[in-house]
Amino acid sequence: MTRSDSHPLTALTALSPIDGRYGSKVSGLRPFFSEFALIRYRVFVEAQWLQALAACTDLADVPPFSASARDFLGRITDGFSVADAKAVKAIEGTTNHDVKAVEYFLKQKVSGHEELSAASEFIHFGCTSEDINNLSYALMVRDARNEILLPAVDQIIALLADMAGALAGQAMLARTHGQPASPTTMGKELANVVARLDRVRDQVATTAIRGKFNGAVGNFNAHLAAYPEVDWQRLSQHFVEGLELDWQQMTTQIEPHDDLAALCHAMARLNTVLIDLDRDLWGYISLGYFRQKTVAGEVGSSTMPHKVNPIDFENSEGNAGIANALLEHLAGKLPISRWQRDLSDSTVMRNLGPAFAHCLMALDAACRGLGKLEIDSARLDAELDRAWEVLAEAIQTVMRRYDVPEPYEKLKALTRGRAEIDADTLRDFVKALPIPKAAQDDLAALTPQSYTGNAETAVRIFLKGRHTPR
């Protein structure tokens, strides 16, 4: 085969599947994590800082802006376009510095406005590039989390909660160590996942996202050299909190990223719960507990026409794994910086977008898979009918209550490793027990389908009492 390097960048020629094969599934993240988005956020932060300086009553050299000046800056940030981003990149071609290019771009944009032009040397005043970058990334992460990731998490939680309620009473044979165990209900097993996702969802949602704005090494050196009378620490806090971020007071040149690491870890835990769900549902489909709705025209195998594969849960598992590999690296690397600053975090931070994208694809695939599932109650009931030995737990526990000698050992001898245990075998055993007649009758009435403890009730109570501050 011949190789061609002349193909334009499209979904077919993209190097990364994030922008290629899966581009349409994660396009909602482009306004937050693309190069265009990063430049747009930088322009916004620079413009907001200029306005904060103008609003500071202790800075007589930057008089308060008129409504005209504020509106002009607002139009620059609100109307920031791809053409504007290209203009910034063109400047960067000369400066070889991305944040300085943003500063020069803004100075060019305000040059036609007399009031703003007079204050143009206060664009990027006292700032190191990291002051702009850390706030830009913080805003990107906050907005992507709140507008894209959390709604996707809420969607899968809602689907699982609905399924848990619908299947609360559907008995199923549990498996511990892969072997038949005390029955549960399918709804209870799904509710368990809802409870886990509720907790980790709230951890993702409430993790602080911090920003710093204190100059080259975190001490306001240049600020105080120029204006020693200004309370720069107070102004910094007011500015950062005005962006609806948490203020990071003590830093080197960089915001230490500890909270970003905590967010990455929380997202990784979310994905781990999702992987656990994917694998369990994959197994339940394999056992026949669930059937999958077929899609017209869809093919399950290139050679075996009968197949309907659980590909959505497999795709979800794979993407959650990739996301976690990225998230674990982000969490482990970003809080580490040599002395007051090194640049090794710069290229790593640019992979926040792919990490979020794989999270989003994992959630989306799992939701698709859930939408195709149909419970096979007959299969579940038939399997329970072949597992009467699971009632041994109940029988030996009641024997303990009435002080029957060696109850566990007696049931072990009767049931362990034997395939021929049926209802009659257990009922004959119960009838011979030295326990009250009422207890014998209760045990004799037990079936694997009815021996589910409080599973159904627990699901109903849990779903009714869930606290979901969405």
Image: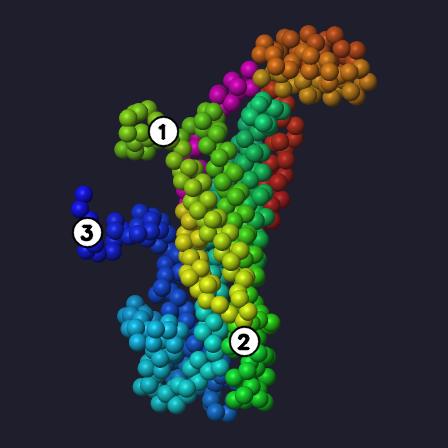
Viewer-nearest residue: 437 or 205: 205
Viewer-nearest residue: 467 or 197: 197
Badge 2 or badge 1: first in the primary sequence: 2
Residue 154 coordinates in the image, percent (x, y): 49, 48
Q: Secondary structure at mark 1?
A: loop
Residue reaching furthest bottom? 60
Judge whether residue 405 can be spotted in this image.
yes
Q: CA distance from mark 2 to mark 1?
A: 59 Å
The image quadrant where one finds the N terminus is top left
Viewer-nearest residue: 348 or 426: 348
Badge 1 or badge 3: first in the primary sequence: 3
Rendered residue at 33%/85% (across/down): 111
The residue pinned by badge 2 equals: 217
Identify whether 10 is placed above or below 133: above
Residue type highlighted by circle 3: Ser
In the image, which is nearer the foreground, mark 1 or mark 3?
3
Residue 374 among magenta residues: yes
Residue type highlighted by circle 2: Val
Residue 407 among magenta residues: no
The residue pinned by badge 1 equals: 308
Tell me the tag on residue 49: none
Tell me the tag on residue 4: 3
Horizontally, is 384 left or right of 28 in the view?
right
Rendered residue at 73%/13% (across/down): 410
> Could you classify mark 1 by the number of other residues whose Cα lies within 10 Å: few (under 14), some (14-19), or many (20 or more)?
some
Q: Main secondary structure of the magenta part?
A: helix
The answer to the question of whether label 2 and label 1 lie on touching residues, with beta carbons closer than 8 A, is no
Horizontally, is 250 left or right of 358 in the view?
right
Segment tinted magenta in the rendering: 363-386
Q: CA distance from mark 2 to mark 3?
A: 48 Å
Rendered residue at 56%/75% (across/down): 218
Residue 239 coordinates in the image, percent (x, y): 53, 76
